[in-house]
Image: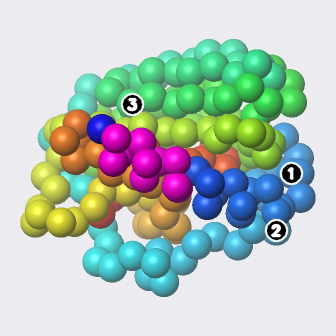
């Protein structure tokens, strides 16, 4: 686990540099000043993990400026203190599908730059991961599951979980 913590710390420091260099976005609109990381420019090969469907699950919780966490199905969202400027009713939906994915509402909600980062930990214990050495990551997708970008992610293959840093709410899926 020390290697995982070191990798997660390094990822968070790198992400801090990117996030803190941006302007403070409106609390309910995507940040248009930070261009998306192009999947093809960073990772190869690409694709969504094929999984045994999880049961449908949906959780709604009100989270305020002090932060909080939401567990939905086998996944965990952690919103740190200071990431939201006002209380927000947050909904996470896990559809029963052959792709491990999560839909967030309100869609487009952007997190304020904070000392800590909003993280999503997704289980992929029910998924096929393919060949050894291929790292799992979290992909930001559109409604048709096309990969738009990859979020900074740390894979923990021993636990079959991947943790990524989120800048805004949308739809995310486990990928390789």
Query: Which range is magenta?
Result: 2-11
**Image quarter (top left, top right, bottom left or bottom right) of the C terminus:** bottom left
Q: Badge 3, how many Cα within 10 Å: few under 14, some, many 20+?
A: many
Mark positioned earlier in the residue sequence (1 or 2): 1
Separation of disc 1 and disc 2 at Cα? Answer: 9 Å
Separation of disc 3 and disc 2 at Cα? Answer: 29 Å
Q: Dots 1 and 2: beta carbons under 8 Å?
A: yes
140 falls in the magenta region: no
Image-quadrant location for residue 62: top right
Asked whether 12 or 79 is in front, the reply is 12
Separation of disc 3 and disc 1 at Cα? Answer: 26 Å
Mark positioned earlier in the residue sequence (3 or 2): 2
**Residue where numbered disc 1 is placed:** 25
Q: Badge 2, how many Cα within 10 Å: few under 14, some, many 20+?
A: few
7 falls in the magenta region: yes
Expressed as whole percent of the image width and height from the top left, the position of residue 29 reads: 81, 49
Name the residue rendered at 32%, 72% in the picture.
46
**Residue where numbered disc 3 is placed:** 75
Expressed as whole percent of the image width and height from the top left, the position of residue 37 reads: 58, 72
Name the residue rendered at 46%, 78% in the picture.
42
For mark 1, give the secondary structure: loop
Name the residue rendered at 23%, 37% in the picture.
159
């Amino acid at each position: 686990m020390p290697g995982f913590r070191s990798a997660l710390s390094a990822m968070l420091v790198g992400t801090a540099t990117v996030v803190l260099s941006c302007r403070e976005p409106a609390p309910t609109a995507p940040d248009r000043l930070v261009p998306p990381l192009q999947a093809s420019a960073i990772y190869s090969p690409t694709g969504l993990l094929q999984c045994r469907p999880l049961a449908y699950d949906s959780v709604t919780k009100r989270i305020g400026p002090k932060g909080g966490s939401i567990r939905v199905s086998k996944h965990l969202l952690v919103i740190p203190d200071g990431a939201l400027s006002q209380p927000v009713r947050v909904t996470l939906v896990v559809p029963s599908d052959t792709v491990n994915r999560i839909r967030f509402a309100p869609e487009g909600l952007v997190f304020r730059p904070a000392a800590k980062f909003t993280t999503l930990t997704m289980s992929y214990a029910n998924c096929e991961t393919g060949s050894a050495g291929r790292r799992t990551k979290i992909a930001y997708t559109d409604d048709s599951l096309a990969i738009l970008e990859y979020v900074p992610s740390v894979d923990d293959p021993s636990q079959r979980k991947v943790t990524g840093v989120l800048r805004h709410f949308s739809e995310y899926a486990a990928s390789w």
